[in-house]
Amino acid sequence: MNEQTYEPMDIANYLVSLALKKEKVITNLKLQKILFFVNAKYLLDHDGNSLMNESFQRWTYGPVMQSVYENFRGFGSDQITKTQGKFVFNPSDPFNAKYEDFDENVIPDSVKKECGEVFDALIDYDPFVLVKFTHSEDLWSDYKKDILNRTAPPYNDQEIFEYFKDNPKEKIWETDNAK
């Protein structure tokens, strides 16, 4: 059974909206790592079914969802202070795009709950501690040379699912597994 997948920006925007509501600091770097762990937990909880319709890339500071990075890159390393909307294009009139603000109602409450659990577990970590977690995983460290040469393949959800299924101590979103 294949479950619905979501736009990465919708999930990322939801995490940003949680940070804003809870008055927590979230940067693009921290967002990327929390998004990765949200994805990992979702894969485990849903028998390997994907949460998002895009793959994470292997970058120097760990996993990155490139579309999310691009949308929030204007904040640099500073705190993200607002969600990002999107342009919706009409295929029959591509020059007549309309801008829509993020609407969290595109995400079901059950997915919001799962995102919130990981968010709450990880939001107070320093972003470089989260980077360290991802660097300690074979999913990243086995590709270190390729990452430095910018030739590393993207992550795939199956390998993320298998890794965390086989390494339950790596589920840092579970408080008793925090390193």
Image (cartoon, rainbow, N blue to C red):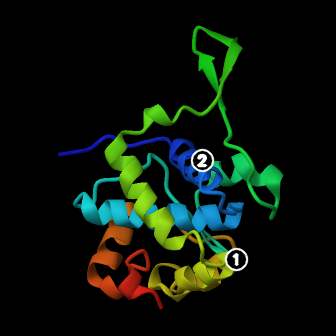
For label 1, count other residues whose C-alpha is less than 10 Å away and answer few (under 14), some (14-19) or many (20+): few
Q: How many marks?
A: 2
Out of 82 and 149, give the one closest to the viewer.
Answer: 82
Residue ID at (36%, 70%):
159
- Tell me which amino acid carries mark 2: Ser
Residue 4 position by quadrant? top left
For the residue labelled by badge 1, is the local secondary structure a helix, a strand or a loop?
A: loop
Out of 174 and 31, give the one closest to the viewer.
Answer: 174
Q: Residue furthest top?
A: 92
Circles 2 and 1: CB distance less than 8 Å? no
Q: Which of the two discs, 2 and 1, labels the residue nearer the N terminus?
A: 2
Residue 51 visible from this viewpoint? no
Out of 22 and 81, give the one closest to the viewer.
Answer: 22
Using the numbered discs, state the Cα–Cα distance from disc 2 to disc 1 in whole angstroms. 35 Å
Residue 69 position by quadrant? bottom right
- Measuring from the top left, give residue 12's x and y in whole percent: 56, 50
- Measuring from the top left, give residue 104's x and y in whole percent: 50, 36
Residue for badge 2: 17
- Measuring from the top left, give residue 119's x and y in whole percent: 50, 63
For the residue labelled by badge 2, is the local secondary structure a helix, a strand or a loop?
A: helix
Up-down: is 92 above or below 11?
A: above
Q: Residue furthest left?
A: 1
Residue ID at (70%, 11%):
96
Residue ID at (37%, 57%):
114
Residue for badge 1: 149
